[in-house]
Amino acid sequence: MPSLDPQIVRSWITVPAPQFVGGNEVDLLEGGDALFPRMREAIEAAREEVWLATYIFHDDASAVALMDALADAARRGVAVHVVVDGFGAKSTLAQLRERLLPAGVGLEVFRPLERWYAWLQPGQLRRLHHKLCVCDGAVAFVGGINLIDDRLDTRHGWSALPRLDYAVQCRGPLALAVYATARATWARAHLWHGWREGVRQVVHAARPVDETVALLRGLRGGTRLPGGRDLRPMRAAFVVRDNLRQRRAIERSYVEAIRGARHAVDIAVPYFYPGRVFRRVLRHAAHRGVRVRLLLQGKLDYRIAGLAARALYEEMRGHGVHIYEYTPAFLHAKVAVVDESWATVGSSNIDPLSLLLNLEANVVVRDAQFARTLRARFEAALAVSAEVDGKPMRSGWRGWLLRATVAWMANVYLRVAGITGRY
């Protein structure tokens, strides 16, 4: 069989660099109760393509309804492609295959772990953490919400209250960037175990990534979409962290926004253990009078992650950063608002796994109304949270020892994962 054209390979695995474009509609969605009906509606309305990437695709009723919608779309002739993480979806792979493959869904597993020796392969600590869905290149969903009921935790079981989590629904040119990334992620997973035939079957049915990149580049410098649509409202960028050319894109987007902050920085994230540059810009913002608030987990799902975050409490609070712990339910949101018009929603935590290892995806929005909407949800969560009180100390051997221990553990993990250098 002749080899596949390298240009086709590159076009399939290329992820466009982030750039702000206008003309978008971005709606904030809180929890799966808001996201899943919108996603099903978009899948049911799809006529050409559906691309979906997720860390967890569970088998509870909410997730099964989405499986069925994907299968139904494939049966009516829509090209449906799904990629799940080999660790996050390990327990439900059998059911996914049973429901999706007979319908003709192109199901791929990113770094599968179904054999014991898979753990010995390089790169297995780097996981697919995207939560993306895009239909016909026109409507896309991005965020931190896995395909699992909000009240179900895979480690702790069912709870009365849903975890706090967010996603966005996007229309406009931003959806094209999500399309390119979701397709590239699927193709990379396919490449893992012999992908040529699969790509040959679908490459002519999908919009070339080169075409998508060219359109996005054209939009960046202009003010109108083809057909005359105004580009100026709702400027947004789709920012991806991968292990190719955009290793620190999400971290840089945070750092640049915080460096430019004048009034307020509000961040909600479950796993918080940033590197030195990120911590420094937070401290400097607080020193120049910016109100900096962190909303972190109070109800812990992983104790070691909680320990890592709390190792930084003394340092952060000693420089004027306010820390709150969310206790009504599990916190899974990865969102931030800076001043009056910068906001982000996505999958990326602020810890070594997300900032340096995993495949992550965030939407960054520069829009005053969207920032107000997200900040209102942040304030509502803050109102039912507890501020970490007590007199902060700038130093102390116990705090230093705890930070040093966590930093050493993080460095060991990153070196095992193939990342060198200090963190």
Image: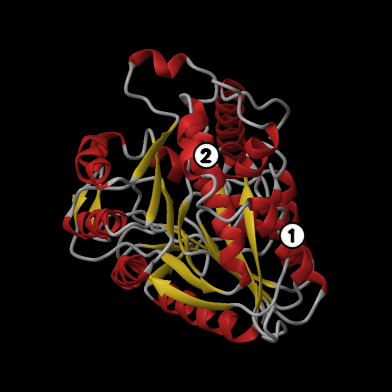
Check disc 1 and give the amino acid type.
Ala
Residue at figure coordinates x 55%, y 57% from the top left: 179
Location of residue 283 (image quadrant): bottom right
Per the image, the residue denoted by label 1 is: 214
Location of residue 233 (image quadrant): bottom right
Per the image, the residue denoted by label 2 is: 187
Label 1: how many residues lie within 10 Å, few (<14), some (14-19) or many (20+)? few
Label 2: how many residues lie within 10 Å, few (<14), some (14-19) or many (20+)? many
Q: Is residue 145 above or below residue 303?
A: below
Q: Is residue 225 in view?
A: yes
Quadrant into which the N terminus falls: top right
User: Residue 13 at what x, y percent from top left?
Assistant: 61, 40
User: Residue 64 at what x, y percent from top left?
Assistant: 20, 54
Camera-side residue: 271 or 245?
A: 245
Camera-side residue: 31 or 316?
A: 31
Residue at figure coordinates x 56%, y 59% from the top left: 178
**Disc 1 versus disc 2: distance between alpha carbons?**
20 Å
Check disc 2 and give the amino acid type.
Ala
